Image (spheres, grey):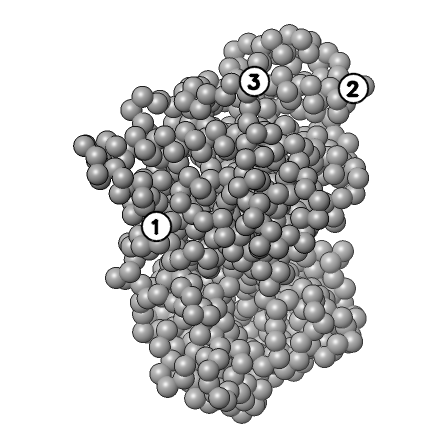
Amino acid sequence: MAAVAPPQASMSAVPSSTESVDVRQFTALEQKVDILVAQLQQLFPSQARPGQFNLKKQKPNALIGGPIPSLPLSPDISLPVTPALEAQEPTVVVPERPSTKIALQILDIIQRYGHNVGSKNAPGPWTGKSKFVAPVEAHVLKNEPVQMVLPAFPFKSPNRKDKTLGNMPDLGEELALMHLNGLCESVAEIYEHGATVVIASDGLVYNDLMGIPDGEVWDYSTAVRDIIQAKELHHIRALRIVDLLDHPNTENLTREEYLVHAGCYRRELIAKYSPANFDAREAVKKDTDICLTYRGYIKFLTKDLKYSHVAEEAQRQENPKKRYKDAIESLALKMITRGKAFAAAIESKCKDHVRLSIHPSVGQKKLSVPLIPQVDGAIMTPWHSSVAVGIDGSFKTVHAGDVRETHDLVLRNGRPYHFREKSDLWDFGNIQVEFEHLYPCGLIIRPAPELESKPSLRDVDVTKLRKLAEVQSPVVLRGFADTTDRELFISKAYEMGTVLPWTFGILQEVKDHGRNDKDHNNVVSSEAMPMHYDGMFKFVTQKDEEGNDMKDEEGNEIKVNRPPGFQYFTSIATAPKGTGYTLFAASRLFWQYLPAPYTVERLEAVKWRMDNNGFWNAKLQDLPLVVRHPKSNAPCMRWHQPWDATKTKFSTCEVTIQNDSQDIVAMVDQMLYDRRVCLRFTWEQGDILLSDNTAMLHTRTGFTGDCDRELWRIHWGGGWAGGTPFYQEHDKSKLDLVGIGMRWASLEVLQVLR
């Protein structure tokens, strides 16, 4: 049985679970869920009987992000009251067919990307989620991708002085599109046919009101399509207004044809889809979603048109501030009216789609989706902002005028691309380089394209790499010479820090050894790996202030976990395309998207136990789930994913939470693979990669066993040192706890999972 949440209502009138609930009585009591009841009757006609619907109280699911900032509001417009949002959200329990269960799981994933407004403008539940069960299940039953539609990506704000960098897409649009594609890829992980987001560009709906030429709308939307193709975002599809009007052969439309007919497309849309007798001002007063959208329009138009003909005209009249305010409100109401027509066209063309929105809403008719989620919960689209990249790799949506003094402007192909926080870490001395910021984390450093020859790894100041990796791992050198020179690779490791030797030496060749027996090391196989940190089994004897070994009450040496601080790789050979990815999960992003009711404070108190057999034959307990980074003191996840015999021929691993709910296991695994948290990195031959082993967790996907994929890996630097976890049991034929750490008897063994 699955819980489907309808719009909220008072629970005082809900009968006890032993009483029969007539559908008509239910409808009378719950006016806000009449649509849901009809859908349930349609989905489950044979089960719609007395007692079928069980309502119980449930706390609202708090979504990611803080409250949205308050928006300017016309003095005569107040936010409509939505009583359903003031009550606890009830749960309707419905019978589950397999297709219904999958549909609900898909909607759960979509909901994780949402941010609806609840009571008092705080983040709230998706009250309209149940509305989309039927269309999503219909796709599932047909074995086809689930469809979502998002009106968005119109054109850049006309205020290119204070807000945006120009009239063309930049890093902001790239991040937004990758974010949406990641949503669809997440669906594909539980539903083989995946999902698609259809972007319905609304540029031509509004551009004439804001003084934006039709040609600029075409150029912007065409560039968005170019990004989709270049980034291989296979789950994104883009539509123009003409596509919604059912004109033939729109895929072959040229710029010249578009410009000739653009005005006609706009007029046809308004004439065909504008609702009869629609009064925008009355709608703002009575409809919460329309009011929220109107307030958003007022906010951005005020700044968008600051240097426009609208502002100039107001300045020529008496009381220019009031004239400008009146003009903005008038434009906002016109946009509401046109928006209704556009929404109707989308509804007609995309009947079976889950409706997404970039505008705040209460979630009854659509799901509000931030395109570049912010730590503070602020919602700002890339066409109304610029992106400022922090030294920590974070992406902030800002107004250009607010960061020009603190950030450098970065160009790409001669055009403004994004802002970057000023720092000496970006300076590589005599080597000219360019930086590519990966989504959701990570950095690629390449030689500048104008260089005549590839600079050598020998000439790179690798201490800069280390400092960058401490704040935005993983950091990759790509396109440099001599990166597979063994002696040079090793010598550069010593420049970065203290190299950690193992019994096999300091360099491990990570490649498939072709063995299949359970006691073999899965690291040197072609199998996928569990999410983990390197050094799970590395222990050293704890010392007192005088340097003496510390012992417990029974006289046993106290062992503490001392994993390496960094992983340092070079790629000798790669796996076939689409396989052999290395995944990096950033603790910084784990905390940003951590769902309620979990908190840093709660998880920092959690201890867990790990039971391994096979090659990694050990049992550990009292492992901390969270540690503090030795440099930044930021909280960092420590984890080894449960790994049973269905996933591996080699060592299995059971994980138990010792002092909290076992639900934490599933939550942690889900969040660490969340595409907003986890980078899927594709290797290229010759890549040098450096990753902070405390700030990041990592794993590997499987690859073709007979391929030549090979990485060289060196560990260096001490990472987190803490706790007193200990072995309850171990296979003494393999393990020997000695003063400098854990050594394995076999030379072929890689001490750390990779």
Q: Residues within 10 Å of mark 3 (few under 14, many from 20)?
A: some
Disc 3 target residue = 32
Q: Amino acid at mark 2?
A: Pro
Q: x%, y% of residue 548?
A: 38, 74
- Please say if 480 is above or below 614: below
Label disc, if present, on residue 45 of the rendered structure:
2
Disc 1 target residue = 159
- Please say if 212 is above or below 292: below
Residue 321 placement: quadrant: top left
Secondary-structure class at tag 1: loop
Q: Specify whether residue 672 is in view.
A: no
**Residue that protrudes farthest toward the front in the picture:** 260
Residue name at image x 47 percent, y 37 percent? 359
Which mark sits nearer the N-terminus, 3 or 1? 3
Q: x%, y% of residue 447?
A: 47, 80
Residue name at image x 42 percent, y 75 percent? 466
